[in-house]
Image: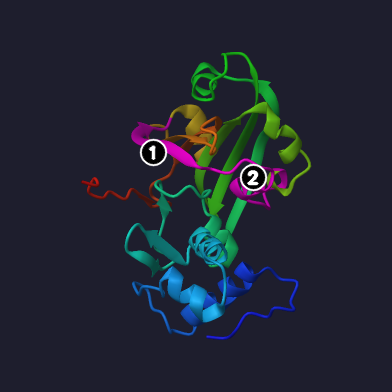
Amino acid sequence: MRSIDRQSPEPYYLQLVRLVEADIDAGKYAVGDRLPAETELCRNFDLARSTVRETLRSLQEKGRIKMVPRRGAFVVDPLQTGWSLQVADGFFEAEVDHHRRNVETQVVKAGLSPLPAAAADALDLHAGDLGYRLQRLRYLDGQIALLSINYLVPEVGPILDGSDVLTGKASLNRTLREGGFSVFGARRSVEAQVATSELAGYLQVPIGAPLLLVTSVSWGRDEKPFDYYTSWVRSDVVKVTIEARAASE
């Protein structure tokens, strides 16, 4: 593997991201292969562990690897990963980053509005309090994939207003993280639902068509929730995956 350019203004972790991606694309690491351990990457590139961890986090965000606790980082097929509910990343970030599939976002509504009871409760606020509502339609390869509504604490307003999130050209999670709202933990659920007339109109499916309803609340390191969303997913377009593992003894 090549070396890190110490004179380049590009952050070291991004340089290592490019080097690892180049090796994956060249076939040095195939789907299912485990990447070198953190300690080995630190030694090979003379980098701090925090830099290597940021590299691996970025590669996972981009859909190139999957981090498995106590086992390491494994190369994945970005076209087959689907939407993993265990991952804190935003929907379709890997596809957008790699341009492997045509992803489009249409913002239906954005701005401060009174919070419904479920959202207010999830965000530890009161029903009727103001929150930031972001409603979007997501398209995959020209097909409508899902309708999502994010309810966020009002403090994110200055971060999102004027950002490319509202033009459908930027990741919500990444923009929030850059503004100081990083996901430290999340609780998500998925259930079956049929399309109402309103949902059928948005998602272009027959009334009564089967959908998946994904509900999530995310919080930061301070354990304060800042994002509650509901997404109605066309399962004929999007594969939703849930990873399960044995509980630690």
Residue 226 on image: x %, y %? 57, 32
**Disc nearer the start of the sequence (2/1):** 2
Q: Distance between the residues labelled 2 and 1?
A: 20 Å
Q: Which residue is drawn at 63% across and 74% down?
A: 15
Residue 15 appearing in the image: yes
The residue lying toward the viewer, choosing from 45 and 108, is: 45
Q: Amino acid type of disc 1?
A: Leu
- Magenta-colored stretch includes residue 171: yes
Residue 193 against residue 181 in the figure, above or below: above
Left or right, 106 with reference to 34: right
Q: How crowded is mark 1: few (under 14 residues within 10 Å), some or many (20 or more)?
A: many
Which residue is identified by label 1? 211
Chain part drawn in magenta = 166-195
Which residue is identified by label 2? 106
Left or right, 77 with reference to 148: left
Q: Which residue is drawn at 48% across and 75% down?
A: 41
Residue 208 on image: x %, y %? 37, 32
Left or right, 83 with reference to 52: left
Residue 42 on image: x %, y %? 51, 73
Residue 81 on image: x %, y %? 40, 60
> Within the image, what quadrant is residue 133 found in?
top right
The residue lying toward the viewer, choosing from 162 and 89, is: 89
Left or right, 159 with reference to 171: right
Q: Residue at x 48, y 62 (%)?
A: 63
